[in-house]
């Protein structure tokens, strides 16, 4: 099933990229014209908000991921492809950052856009963002109220 592949591939890509960042970017950032690779330990949420609220984030993530998995399993046969792909991306990204919080106490971020002032992020964040973007497209252009 493509959805399980998306979740597993996202987790593997996220883990491998974070291991690479840990081994190569601590104290040795790479600066480029478009992207900087800068190691950061994020102990908060998006944009670093709610620093040091690890238990809160772990509990919220478990609750949200459990609900998304329940909803997905219950409805995947009736959902359009775009919604199932969106949910798969969100679940994968959420689990990737959950792993970091659970085992490290922080999330490893390392991708920084060099030409704008934007927070440093990681592959799991990209997966969540793509999933949310696809969800928005689904809600705005595909979903029909009954």
Image (tube, rainbow, N blue to C red):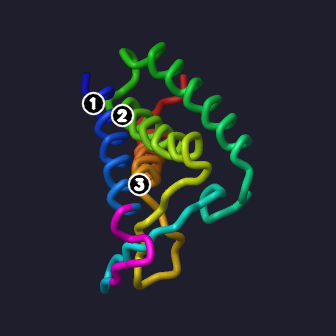
* Position of residue 20 in the picture relative to residue 129 (left or right): left
The residue located at (39%, 78%) in the rendering is: 29
Q: Which residues are magenta?
A: 23-31
Q: Please name the residue that numbered disc 3 is placed on.
A: 126
Query: Does the magenta segment cover residue 42?
Result: no
The residue located at (66%, 57%) in the rendering is: 44
Asked if 101 appears above or below 46 in the picture, the reply is: above
Depth check: 25 or 125 in front?
25
Q: Residues within 10 Å of mark 2 (few under 14, many from 20)?
A: many
Give the Cα distance between marks 2 and 1. 5 Å
Q: Please name the residue that numbered disc 1 is placed on.
A: 5
Quarter of the image that includes the C terminus: top right
Q: Quadrant of residue 20?
A: bottom left
* Position of residue 55 in the picture relative to residue 47 (left or right): right
Q: Secondary structure at mark 2?
A: helix
Q: Secondary structure at mark 1?
A: helix
Query: Does the magenta segment cover residue 28?
Result: yes
Q: Residues within 10 Å of mark 1 (few under 14, many from 20)?
A: few
Quarter of the image that includes the N terminus: top left
């Amino acid at each position: 099933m493509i959805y399980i592949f998306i979740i597993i591939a996202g987790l593997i890509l996220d883990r491998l990229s974070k291991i690479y960042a840990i081994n190569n970017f601590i104290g040795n950032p790479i600066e480029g014209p478009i992207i900087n690779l800068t190691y950061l330990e994020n102990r908060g949420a998006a944009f670093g908000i709610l620093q040091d609220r690890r238990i809160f984030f772990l509990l919220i993530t478990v609750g949200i991921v459990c609900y998304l998995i329940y909803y997905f399993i219950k409805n995947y046969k009736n959902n359009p492809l775009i919604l199932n792909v969106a949910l798969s991306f969100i679940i994968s990204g959420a689990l990737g950052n959950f792993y970091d919080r659970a085992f490290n106490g922080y999330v490893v971020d390392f991708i920084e856009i060099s030409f704008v002032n934007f927070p440093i992020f990681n592959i799991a964040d990209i997966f969540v963002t793509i999933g949310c973007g696809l969800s928005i497209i689904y809600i705005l252009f595909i979903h029909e109220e009954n």
